[in-house]
Every structure is written in structure tokens, then in C-alpha cells.
Image (cartoon, rainbow, N blue to C red):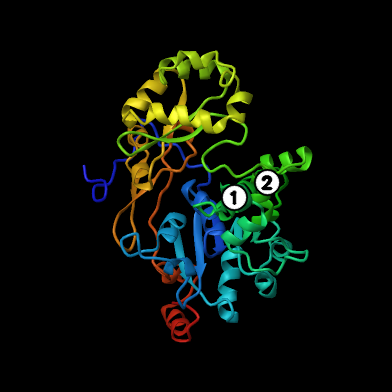
Amino acid sequence: MDTDTDPAAAPTAPLGSAPEPLPLAGLTVVAVEQAVSAPFATRQLADLGARVIKVERPDGGDFARAYDTAAHGLASHFVWANRGKESLALDLKDPRGLGVLHELLSGADVFVQNLAQGAAARLGLDAATLCARYPRLVAVDVSGYGPEGPYAHKRAYDMLVQCEAGLVSVTGTPGLPVKAGIPAADIAAAMYAFSGVLAALLRRGTTGRGGPVEVSMLDALAEWMGHPLHHTMHGGEQPVRTGLAHAVIAPYDAYPTADGDRVLLSVQNDREWARLARQVLGRPDLAEDPAYATNAARTRGREKTDAVVAEALGRLGADEAVGLLEAAGIACARLNSVAQLAAHPQLAARDRWRQVDSPAGPLRALLPPIGLPGGAEPRMGAVPALGEHTDALLRALGMTGAQITALRRDGVIA
């Protein structure tokens, strides 16, 4: 089957049974969002059944729409973070546009924004102001560094926050710090915003009141830095950058194979080392050799340890190496490319791929990681074109065709 053109069939409910409702069905989310952090958070809500209305600038919309054209002419970031949403192109600097937003908020359950620091407050769209006006609303402020402090108004792009949070200092090789290859700060903030919304909705179910939720990219990524942070604060030394190796375990690295691939293995204890030496390296003597028999010795002599492992795996193809390692009970993995991830046999075997519609046609997308009760299928809706739902949303608010035409003529909507 051509997975780029043939939509995968969604699992169906047993005959005679109704499909399980999605957990957030019936909830309305309004988002004034851009880039990755807030959009990725609200995409999780859309996948779980919430109606998500994405408010965008009329003059180009979410600037992530223009990051690249890799997804059949669409931006890959935007496709990833914005499926299942309705796009409303609305100028919030015009009082009429702001009035439309408040009409939507009066019936909404959740509001999420990640405007530049101070911009939401100037428009009266900060979480505290909105929750005072709409007591049942859960309102989320996503920022770079939080609403106060010396960094509150500092520009906060993902790479910059990775640097400020120290992630870059522990990632890379001894001679070269590198940023993570994914927007780790954005994703961290998004997932805490997502879980914060769910927690606030649970609280509203018992108290009847919503309330503000605050997430900053720095706070979120600093939490993810827990291991090196505690290691440094309490142990006195920052973990060294070791590339794919491990600072205190050996062997633990990726080793080249005879066919040009790389296989990563991790030996967690001395029993595993003995099995590796006997069953994979063909060197049973190393199981008892004091220079190799303990992890402390192997780590002290890391270069010799790595050399003996590399020599053995270098004589094998990747498939043979993985087969021997698995037979010996040694944790291992291939050093896959992104293309190999897209073709990963485990994802295929577990039917993890679906198709989502978009202005460029159907696109492959992974199911969300959360498995739902009763096998309910997440709602993986279409990626919206800019302003695709503007007219329908305004008509639902009671506007006439003439009123909509006037707003479009004046540039308030697109």
C-alpha cells in the first residue's frame, strides 16, 4: 500500500456497540498561538476530542506557516502541531476583532496564548484578567521565562532557552556542545501546558471554577534537566559531554559495523559484560580479566574497552550484530536516521500511522502516544488553511454576510 496516498482505515467498534466518546468531546478551546509551544499543547487537546479554534493574524497567520515548505508545500512544524483545528484569521488590535474573540471566550472552556511577553496583558488576554471575567474558563499563559524577574521580557526561542537551561552544556561531545535536534524547550512547555489544562479541568469539575495556568519554557526544561542538575548541585561536578557514550558506564556507545551502519549497545552490569565477552566478542577471557571485569575498570580504561568492542562489531553486519547482542541479552539499538524512523517496523506492526487532510492533500501522521480507553481512535483532523473557518465561525456568532464582508474589507478578518 502506498502510505502517502492511501488512508489507513481506522479501527472500528464491534458490531452493535457505540464508539467510545473521546475524553474532551464537547469542550471548546480558543488559542491565540504561534510557533510550537502553545500549538503543540492545543493539538493534544484536539486529538482528544476538543474543538480548538486557532486565532491567527490575517496577514500571514501563525509565522510557523512559513518556516519551510517540506510537507508537500506546507511547513513541517505547522503540519505537526496544528491538525484538527479551526483557523480564524482575526486582527485583535482592532476593537471589532477583539470583540469577536470575547464572544468566543464567553462560551469557551479553555484559552491558551503564547504571545510575546506583555502583549496579552495589553489586550486584556492574560490568564488572570480572563479568569476574573470568565470564572469557568481555564486560561493558560505560555511564556519563555515567566511573567516576572529579570528575564521576563527576554526573547525566548527554543535554542536560546536550551542554552539558558544548560541542556546544550550536557549535549554533544567533549569538544563541541550542541543543541538538541528537536525543539526540546517548546515541547517541554507544551506538554506541561497540556497536563496543566487537564488538571485545571478536573478541578473545575469539583469546584465549578476554572482558573489561570502558567507555564514557562525555562521552568519546563529546567525540570527536564533534573539528573544533571542534581548531579551538579549535590555531587559538585557537572556531567561531562560524552556524545553517545555514558559518563559512568562502559561499554555504552555506538559502534560501526562492517556494512557501514552503527549499532549502539549498553552494558548495565558486570554479568552482562561477561555474556558480551563470551557470546559476542568471542573473548571469554575478558569476563575475568581485572582490566575489564568491573564497570569501574572498564570506565577507567574506556578507550581499551571501546576498542575491543569496536573490533568485534566491525567484523559483523548490523543485522548479525543485533542478532548476537539480543541473543546474549544485551540492550542494543540501531542508530537510525529519520527516514528509518518513518519506516520503522515496530510502528508499522502496531498500526501507528494514519492520514490527515491538509490544504496540500493527505499527509502521513503518527497516532498520539496516549492510548485511549476502549480503543477509541483520536480525532486527527485536518491541518487548516489560514482563515479557512472564519466565515463559518462568525456566522455561528450571529453575524450577517454584510457584516462579514465589511470586516474583511477593513482587514479585520481574512
- x, y percent for residue 106: 61, 64
Location of mark 2 (residue) = 223
The number of discs equals 2
- Residue lying at the far left of the rendered structure: 1
The residue under the point 52% across, 18% down is 272
Q: Are marks 1 and 2 in contact (CB under 8 Å)?
A: yes
The secondary element bearing badge 1 is classed as helix
The residue under the point 48% across, 75% down is 399
**What amino acid type should be assigned to the residue bearing mark 2?**
Glu
- Real-space Cα distance between discs 1 and 2? 9 Å
Q: Nearer the viewer, residue 72 or 25?
A: 72
- Corner quadrant of residue 311: top left
Mark linked to residue 137: none
Q: Nearer the viewer, residue 317 or 406?
A: 317
**What amino acid type should be assigned to the residue bearing mark 1?**
Ala
- x, y percent for residue 43: 49, 53
- x, y percent for residue 176: 56, 53
